[in-house]
Image (cartoon, rainbow, N blue to C red):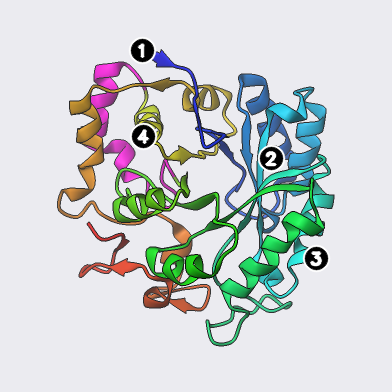
Amino acid sequence: MAASVPTFNGIPSVGLGCWMGQPGEAEEAYKMVRQALKLGYRHIDTAFGYGNEEAVGNAIRDSGTPRSEIFVTTKLTNEHHASVVQGFETSFKNLDIGYIDLYLMHWPCAADESGKQLSPSEGPDFVQVWKEMEKLLETHAGKVKHLGISNFSIKTLEVLLPQVKVVPVANQVEVNPYHPQIPLKKYCESKGIQIIAYGPLGQTRRTFLEDPEVLAVAEKYKISPGQVCISWAVQRKTIPIPKSSNPDRLKQNITLVTFAQEDFDRIENLHKQPGKHRSSDGMTLKVPGSVWGWTMEEMGWHVGPDGTIGDDQ
């Protein structure tokens, strides 16, 4: 049966991702956010790097939905690691919605002003970046409510957490039935860090939407395969942020069901089947063995014997 959308740690448990597949697409992003808010979404996720903060902010202001009802996330881009205040103020101005609910460090990786990606030894250390972000809570009090991170592994978290004054509220990472991030999820939960799941319906590879196990559960509950994946994510207390500009899919994505334990377990354990435990994120697959100038080892990501990227099973 349909369930209402709960909140986890004060964050609505289903959000709208605003990465449009390429930077910009402002008009489509505007229409998508307006439609989503009309349908009942109250969690909007964008980033400076998406190139559509202004469109997202315009849609929020024009929606008529009270600002206090909407949870808005944006992110510090790699190029602003050496200029955190500038990065924040640019996003704050772009959005123009009074305050930012959650400000994430988009990646632990840095880039210079020209966009050249820097290795860990070349760029600002992500611990230094986080300490600069922490200062925002005082210097920009009222303009940013919470801080978090994105694309951090257990390895990078173990470097960061012993040196923080403010524990990140959330860690936004890829999570879906083929890439469930079980060890990372358990680790973050032990530290009070909420997992927010990007790519919950897949990105470059969406094969799990056609997986026989997913289709069987969808048929049993009379829902779409996408709803299976999103409902599973929420039932395990992760927060999916699917993107869709299709009104019907937008409505489906926020219409949740609660699975019987046996059906939940079918999806939770799907990644254990041979050949299914892998990332579908195009960025992590773009340059084999590296991401944003960092090696998989430096990122703390496990690479399987077949070359697929995933968390340890």
Residue type for callout 1: Met
| Mark 2 vs 3, N-terminal side | 2
Q: Nearer the viewer, residue 297 or 284?
A: 297
The mark found on residue 172 in the picture is: none
Q: What is the C-alpha distance between the residues marked 1 and 4?
A: 16 Å
Q: Position of residue 253 (x, y in %)?
A: 48, 28
Q: Which type of secondary structure does the marked residue at label 4 adopt?
A: helix
Magenta stretch encompasses residue 68: no
Identify the residue position indicated by label 4 in the image.
229
Residue at 63 percent of width and 29 percent of height: 42
| Mark 3 vs 4, N-terminal side | 3
Q: Nearer the viewer, residue 227 or 6?
A: 6
Q: Which span of residues is magenta-colored?
A: 200-223
Q: Quadrant of residue 270?
A: top left
Q: Position of residue 7 (x, y in %)?
A: 52, 30
Residue at 24 percent of width and 18 percent of height: 220
Q: Which type of secondary structure does the marked residue at label 2 adopt?
A: helix
Residue type for callout 3: Gln
Q: What is the C-alpha distance between the residues marked 3 and 4?
A: 37 Å
